[in-house]
Amino acid sequence: MSHDANCIFCKIIDGKIPSMKLVETDKSYAFVGLLIIPKYHAAKMHELPDDSLADILPVAKKVAIATGATEYNVLQNNGRLAHQEKGLVVGWPSSQPPKEELQKFPDAQVHEKLLSQLPK
């Protein structure tokens, strides 16, 4: 398996950077923040082995079911110029809960809720 000790995603997979894991397979890792990353280090999608690519969509399906999202995008960026500049657009109705309501749901609670919703 390819690995780069300086890669932020490799550090997350190795547990050197904390994350709240949702789904982990032999080839993929999904965590709160809703990123699904291959465990094989590659800078670009076309550098990934086919078995790593084939593993990602079933993981995305589990995460979609767990979040309850009925409309969503699955995006993959390649290279520095393909990065995200603005916030994500999600596929459920937008709402603006009061700040005190948001503070009741720290990442750890979101993590636990999503874990309980994952299909087996």
Image: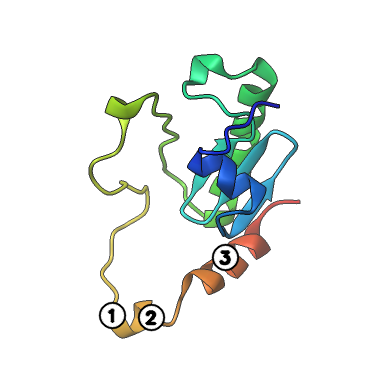
Give the quarter of the image for residue 38.
Answer: top right
Q: Position of residue 52 (x, y in %)?
A: 65, 25
| SS at badge 3 | helix
Kind of residue at badge 3:
His
Residue in view at x 32 percent, y 28 percent = 80
Question: Is residue 8 rendered to the left or right of residue 30?
Answer: left
Residue in view at x 58 percent, y 40 percent = 10
Pointer 3 residue: 111
Gap between marks 1 and 3, in whole Å?
19 Å
**Nearest to the observer: residue 111 or residue 3:** 3
Q: Is residue 106 above or below residue 58?
A: below
**Nearest to the observer: residue 82 or residue 58:** 82
Q: Which mark is residue 103?
A: 2
Kind of residue at badge 2:
Gln
Gap between marks 3 and 2, in whole Å?
14 Å
Q: Is residue 32 above or below residue 47?
A: below
Q: Is residue 99 above or below residue 114?
A: below
Pointer 1 residue: 99
Tell which circle, 1 or 3, labels the residue nearer the N-terminal end.
1
Q: Are marks 3 and 2 in contact (CB under 8 Å)?
A: no
Question: Is residue 23 rendered to the left or right of residue 42?
Answer: right
Q: Are marks 1 and 2 in contact (CB under 8 Å)?
A: yes
Residue in view at x 63 percent, y 31 percent = 3
